[in-house]
Amino acid sequence: MSIIFQLLINGIIAGAIYALVASGFSLIYNTCKFVNFAHGAVVAFSAYIVYFFFSTLNFNFGFSVVFALLFASILGWAMNHFVYKRFRDRKASNSILLIASFGLLILIESLILILFGADVKTINYIQVTKGIEIFGAIITPLQIFIVVSSAVIFLALFLFMKKTKLGKAMRAVSNNKDVAEILGINSQTIYSWSFIIGSFIAGIAGILIGLEQNLEPTMGTNLIVKGFTAAIIGGVGNVYGAILGALLLGLAENFGIWYLPSGYKDAIAFIILFIFLLFKPKGLFGIKREGDREQ
Amino acid sequence: MISAYFIHLLILVGIYLILAISLQISIGFTGMLNLGHIAFFAIGAYTSALLVLNGFPFWLALLSAGIVAMVFGYALSLPIKKLKGDYLALATMGFSFVVYAVLLNWTELTRGPLGIPGIPKPSFLGINFSSNFSFLILILIITLVCYFLINRITNSPFGKVLESIRDDELASKTLGKNTSKAKSISLMVSAFFAGIAGSLYAHYITFIDPSSFTLMQLIPVLCIVIIGGLASMKGTLIATFIIVLLPEPLRFIGFPSSVVGPMRQIIYALFLLLILLYKPKGIYGKVEME
């Protein structure tokens, strides 16, 4: 019984982390309509920024976090402004944008590798403490913090999309760009904002992951892969679906390794991805999109 | 000394050329954005290495590498038949992650992260190809055969069916072509040649481990295909030389070896972005990616 509970808790923690990556990814996907692999690199880079300022230069932790978030947002904005915008101006297809974002991901990962080296890094802000026991399962205060802060961020994101003018404009562009433009919404500005906000969330994800796990230069690839799997499971075109998809993915992985050797954890995500692509390509809450699946 | 270095580069050009023209079949000719190609390369390399180490002759291992990769190509074609664009890209990429996870974890067969050392250099028809020069001759012959075969396939009526799928799948169906079967065959042929390239790679380097077959390794191949131009064999040939030789000067500038690897990736990634931005059809390409 306590094993089941432990797996459940581990699944929720993993799910919360994936959801942070997936929601930012999904936000960008919804407005800009292409798979931004480089989102993973933003997650990784902001974790490394905290490491650099806090663990190497011994700055204040709060300052390091603020700086990392600022950096993540600027990086997202810059990627859109200097790379993707040019492709859009040329009316490039979303396959080309996908390859370009893949190129950016490799570019930024290699940059991290040169700047920080290939060895594993740890931030060491919160000392490893004894976990709290709930029904025989163990959860550390940091893990509770991760789950709670993800929940807060999702609530904030929900309110932002529903209540603010910018959030509404984003939904309008995501729904129908041409009509939104007729109504006087500047879609270029909306693209910029969705990159800034999406990357900001990626920055938060990077920091929380950096506190919980070790930093590796290739961590971004691994995370973005989980992020888009979650987004597809939840349904493309739906940020909340992505969050739920991420939770499902986290749970499936952690319960999956009950049966399979733990090394196969990463493969489980793809087996689920294949099942969804085959039987439910629109995901759990997906909205039909043009060219999704043509017969 | 210098000639040995050039022989090494030419062997790499040969292996990359087979890998790139086989990827051209699925991306360039059929228009399927296949990001799982490196998995077929891996399957070919492991199949061939394991067979030869278990006493089978090289020619049989080489052929089996292609055939086993082809079988996996067929298996992959089933779930992705109806997918397009970015969904297809994600699914094929997912396939390469699954293969990677299996290579890493099925330790009884693949020795996992330890890799397979001591893969013998090929011997074939009583000739031993252990020196790099003789290996170059072997690569040259096999590359020419592969180039010739793929050229024939893509210029055949079947190749035209593939191109019609890329340009307008619905029109192709209207003309009575079984497009899902054609796509499946395209992926299988593509996988077959990638498997051959994998076998040659394994026997040349003589050591393989899962880390040689990650997404990072796909970048140069993808670069070649896009720089050469979709569906252009001639462009692919030129681009292979460019991509293999381009990062070589890094070796002589005197960077530490830990920097050379990522530097090379940065050069590839930058080159890829610049080509996509300023010359999206590549050197000799006729079509742009949809």
Image: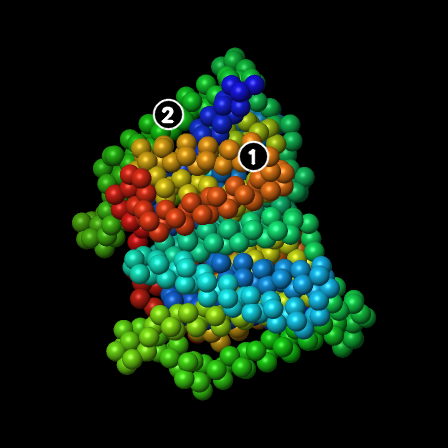
Amino acid on which the number 2 mark rests in the picture? Val
Precedes in sequence: disc 1 or disc 2: 2
Question: Of all residues shown, which one is farthest toward the right?
Answer: A130
Residue B93 lies left or right of residue A139; in this view the side is left
Question: Which disc number belongs to residue B32?
Answer: none
Name of the residue lying farthest toward the left: B175
Q: Is residue B51 left or right of residue B152?
A: right
Q: Which residue is mark 2?
A: B145
In the rendering, at what x and y percent does residue A293 appear? 34, 62
Q: Taking A226 as reference, is B238 left or right?
A: left
Relative height, residue B140 to residue B79 (above, below): above
Q: As displayed, is residue B198 above or below residue A156?
A: above
- Which quadrant would the C terminus of chain B be assigned to in this image? bottom left
Residue drawn at point x = 54 percent, y = 36 percent: B250
Q: B243 or B23: which is nearer to us?
A: B243
The secondary element bearing badge 2 is classed as helix
Q: Disc 1 to disc 2, how far (Cα)?
A: 37 Å
Subunit bearing disc 1? B
Crowding near the residue tagged with mark 2, few <14, some 14–19, many ≥20 C-alpha atoms within 10 Å: few
Q: Is residue B274 left or right of residue A273?
A: left
Quarter holding residue A166? bottom left
Which residue was labeled with disc 1?
B253
Res A175 seen here: no
Answer above or below: position of A139 versus B205.
below
Residue drawn where x is 57% and y is 78% of the image = A153
